């Protein structure tokens, strides 16, 4: 196995939860190698909304998504993790000593004693509303994510959706766009109450336009999106001038090859034991948005907790002859390799 990448833990997914698991593993003297299909670390935070503010990370009243990723990378730097980026894990094989050989689509092979799946939503794509001519304007006024908010400065923006992303980007872009309109098919939002309150406040101050119980029905333009039509519950139609239409209806998860690994799958998520977040296959764990169990909350904070618990359990596979004695970092410090 001299030609293999050797590590204690192989982490599939280099999003925030996967990155934090490197820190928790490092405290217990376990090395990590991370594999991600994306060309950079950070998962959805870096790929989809790097400039989006996040409000529920302890110790940070607000922090931008990419800033959180950058801080996590600084936090794990002392533990010298290694990475394979831009490659997708295709197969896993259990060998005689009960460890794993993990192989990617580019024939990279990793030998690990423990496998951790921290793949967020797996392979994902945006959920698209059923609007005629939608695909015609993709990249020409229709955007399914906000990578660079400056692209929308001094533009007429229409956002559709009722979740946290729609609310958060409405609040953020209202400060820099020429005009911001939020369209939602219901009367109430699914997002955080504080964000919902802020959106209604902006609407009452005429800083945004809010159209509830409404749907975008048609798009029009000549080479680039110029206007769209909105239909209200009473069937009345409104035409809006628009430079960019941003439908934010979440992501459609696709597990990809993970679905063929013999794991218990429930609605595109991996079932785990909440004792240590181990799957039905010994030595394979699933943490973050990709797992499921009763009471699951899909929060980064929840994934951080799962990463800590997972590492405590993984220790027995990496060091079967050693007894784990838990110590606080305030007492024990951070001892690097």
Image: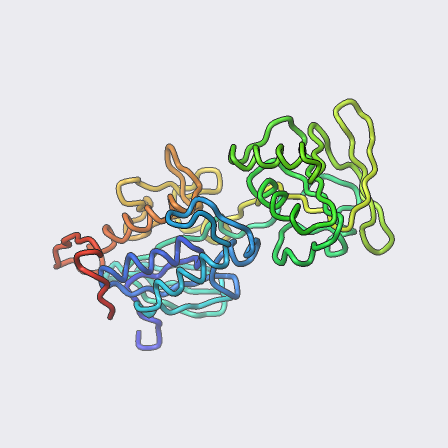
The reply, left or right, for residue 93 in relation to residue 191 is left
Question: Could you tell me which residue is drawn at 36 percent across and 56 percent down?
Answer: 20
- Whether residue 316 appears in this view of the structure is yes
The reply, left or right, for residue 313 in relation to residue 84 is left
- Whether residue 95 appears in this view of the structure is no
User: Which residue extends farthest front?
Assistant: 205
Between 304 and 204, the residue placed more toward the observer is 204
Residue 134 image offset from top left, x and y in percent: 76, 46
User: Which residue extends farthest bottom?
Assistant: 2
Between 269 and 173, the residue placed more toward the observer is 173
User: Which residue extends farthest right?
Assistant: 222
Question: Could you tell me which residue is drawn at 36 percent across and 67 percent down?
Answer: 110
Residue 204 image offset from top left, x and y in percent: 67, 32
Q: Quadrant of the C terminus?
A: bottom left
Q: Is residue 269 above or below residue 65?
A: above
Between 277 and 141, the residue placed more toward the observer is 141
Between 146 and 210, the residue placed more toward the observer is 210
Occupied quadrant, residue 132 = top right
How many badges with numbers are in the image?
Answer: 0
Residue 2 image offset from top left, x and y in percent: 31, 77
The reply, left or right, for residue 171 in relation to residue 154 is left
The reply, left or right, for residue 31 in relation to residue 240 is left
Occupied quadrant, residue 200 = top right
């Amino acid at each position: 196995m001299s030609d293999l990448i050797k590590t204690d833990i192989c982490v599939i997914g280099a999003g925030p939860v996967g990155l934090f698991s490197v820190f928790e593993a490092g405290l217990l003297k376990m090395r990590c190698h991370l594999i991600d299909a994306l060309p950079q670390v950070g998962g959805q935070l870096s790929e989809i909304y790097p400039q989006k503010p996040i409000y529920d990370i302890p110790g940070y009243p607000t922090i931008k998504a990419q800033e959180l990723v950058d801080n996590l990378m600084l936090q794990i730097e002392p533990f010298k993790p290694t990475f394979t980026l831009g490659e997708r894990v295709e197969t896993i094989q259990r060998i005689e000593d009960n460890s794993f050989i993990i192989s990617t689509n580019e024939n990279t092979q990793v030998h690990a004693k423990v496998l951790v799946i921290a793949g967020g939503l797996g392979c994902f794509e945006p959920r698209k509303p059923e609007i005629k001519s939608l695909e015609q304007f993709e990249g020409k006024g229709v955007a399914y994510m906000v990578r660079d908010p400056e692209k929308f400065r001094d533009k007429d923006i229409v956002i559709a959706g009722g979740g946290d992303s729609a609310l958060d980007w409405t609040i953020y872009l209202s400060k820099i766009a020429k005009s911001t309109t939020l369209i939602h098919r219901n009367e109430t939002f699914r997002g955080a109450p504080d964000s919902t309150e802020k959106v209604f406040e902006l609407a009452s101050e005429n800083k945004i336009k809010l159209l509830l119980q409404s749907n975008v029905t048609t798009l029009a333009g000549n080479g680039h999106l110029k206007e769209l039509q909105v239909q209200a519950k009473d069937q009345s139609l409104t035409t809006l001038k628009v430079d960019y239409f941003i439908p934010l209806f979440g992501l459609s998860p696709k597990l990809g090859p993970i679905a063929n690994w013999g794991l218990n799958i429930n609605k595109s998520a991996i079932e785990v034991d909440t004792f240590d977040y181990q799957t039905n296959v010994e030595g394979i764990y699933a943490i973050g948005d990709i797992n499921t169990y009763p009471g699951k909350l899909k929060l980064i904070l929840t994934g951080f907790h799962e990463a800590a618990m997972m590492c405590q359990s993984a220790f027995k596979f990496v060091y079967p002859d050693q007894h784990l004695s838990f110590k606080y970092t305030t007492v024990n410090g951070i001892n690097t390799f």
